[in-house]
């Protein structure tokens, strides 16, 4: 989870740079930054899937109901985080492509790619409240451990 979070943080930074470049109509750099963000979100998604497998295995070794609940919540969280990162991976894939098209003067294709990008942003935004709910459940469970 740590490695996934680190990759996601790096991806967020590149996404911010891509967004800033886009706002300045600097499509050359937007393409580059969105490409980097795409790669790092992909890395994060895979790391979250690896963490999910770890917590799936942890369920087999849990010795109490609380431990089982925590492992299940963390398993669910990592699955959701993988989906969220995957949506951002797709977002940036389309973002980079759109900026390439804009840079080369093909605004119709750039606009079409932005439309596809926005579909993934919408899905991402729909997943975030579920992520927050899982974190709240984890926090509540951990309070009972102390």
Image (cartoon, grey):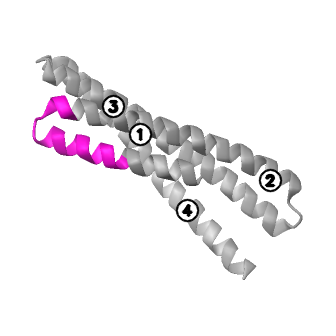
Looking at the rendered image, the disc whose residue lies closer to the viewer, 1 or 4, is 1
- Magenta region: 12-29
* Residue at the spot of label 2: 58
Instruction: Give me the residue at 61% from left, 72% from top.
Output: 139
Q: Nearer the viewer, mark 1 or mark 3?
A: 3
Camera sees residue 119: no
Quadrant containing the C terminus in the rendered view: bottom right
Question: Of label 4 and label 3, which has the lower sequence position?
Answer: 3
Local SS, label 3: helix
Residue at horizontal 59%, vertical 60%? 134
In the image, residue 94 lies at what x, y percent?
Answer: 32, 28
For residue 146, say whether it is visible: yes
* Front position among marks 2 and 4: 2
Q: Residue at x 59, y 42 (%)?
A: 47
Identify the residue position indicated by label 1 in the image.
88
Quick one: label 2 or label 3, which is nearer the N terminus?
3
Return the residue at label 4: 133
Q: Residues within 10 Å of mark 4 (few under 14, many from 20)?
A: few
Secondary structure under tag 2 reads helix
Which of disc 4 and disc 2 is earlier in sequence? 2
Quadrant of res 135: bottom right
Q: Main secondary structure of the magenta part?
A: helix
| CB-based contact (under 8 Å), mark 1 and mark 2 | no
- The residue located at (36%, 48%) in the rendering is 12
First in sequence, mark 1 or 3: give its number: 3
* Left or right for 26, reference 48: left
């Amino acid at each position: 989870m740590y490695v996934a979070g680190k990759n996601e943080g790096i991806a967020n930074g590149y996404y911010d740079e891509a967004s800033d470049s886009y706002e300045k109509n600097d499509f050359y750099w937007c393409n580059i930054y969105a490409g980097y963000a795409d790669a790092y979100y992909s890395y994060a998604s895979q790391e979250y899937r690896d963490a999910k497998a770890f917590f799936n295995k942890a369920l087999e070794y849990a010795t109490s109901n609380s431990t089982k609940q925590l492992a299940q919540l963390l398993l669910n969280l990592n699955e959701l985080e993988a989906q969220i990162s995957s949506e951002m991976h797709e977002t940036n894939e389309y973002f980079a492509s759109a900026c390439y098209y804009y840079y080369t003067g093909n605004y119709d294709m750039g606009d079409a790619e932005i439309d596809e990008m926005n579909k993934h942003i919408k899905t991402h935004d729909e997943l975030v409240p579920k992520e927050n709910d899982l974190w709240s459940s984890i926090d509540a469970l951990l309070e009972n451990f102390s």
